[in-house]
Image (tube, grey):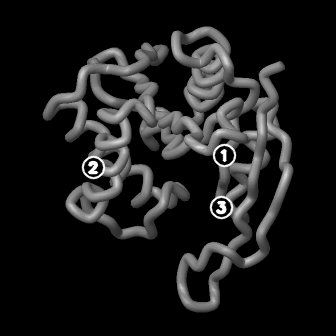
Amino acid sequence: MTLTFEMDPAVGPALRDGVLALWADVSDAGGAVGFVPPVTPDEIRPALLRHLVDMARGDTRLLVGRDEDGEVAATAFFTFNTHPLMTHWVWLYTVMVHPRHQGRGHGRDLMAAVERTARTAEGFEAIEAIRLTCRGGTGVDGFYARSGYKEVGRVPGAIRVAPGDDRDDIVMLLPLT
């Protein structure tokens, strides 16, 4: 089974609810996507609404992966820089693969689709790099490194998961040129 990727899908209740469910399931499985388990879709909704508002303004674009049943199984949000000295690279946020699809290479497929999109999609012509941050102590930085990203910065203890559980904020970059 493979995932089918789509850039800029139509936003409606099914997509919104699918992303909310994915985000909650990934968070509850221990995924480092902005929340600490347990979390509900209602707790995540404000963060998704910020992404959707940014999408409506054209500042953010969504790459979604769907499984064979058409369900949302993976996401990555590209956010364009508005600072005039940084418009040549994009941020990548909320990179997720549903836990039931993990361990099958879908994460690698998602990251390949991210890179392909940044290299070829309309509106990305001036983009020379993708930048993301990830939570230390999860091993996900190794996953991104295997996908071609290089660690370019680290802020020790910048993420407080719980009292006494501080993690590094790791900055990673994928040059496209």
* Amino acid type assigned to the residue bearing label 2 in the image: Leu
Labels 2, 3: front one: 2
Q: Are marks 2 and 3 in contact (CB under 8 Å)?
A: no
Task: Specify which label sits upstream in the sequence, 2 or 3.
Answer: 2
Look at 75% across and 25% down and name the residue there. Answer: 128
- Tell me which amino acid carries mark 1: Leu
Q: Label 3 neighbourhood size at 10 Å, few (<14), some (14-19), many (20+)?
A: many
Q: Earlier in the sequence, mark 1 or mark 2?
A: 2
The single residue placed furthest to the bottom in the displayed view is: 163
Three-letter amino acid code of the residue under disc 3: Arg
The residue located at (26%, 62%) in the rendering is 40
Q: Nearer the viewer, residue 112 or 56?
A: 56
Quadrant location of the C terminus in the rendered image: top right
Q: Identify residue for label 3.
A: 135
Q: Which residue is mark 2?
A: 49
- What is the CA distance from the residue labelled 2 to the residue labelled 3? 23 Å
Q: Which mark is residue 173?
A: none
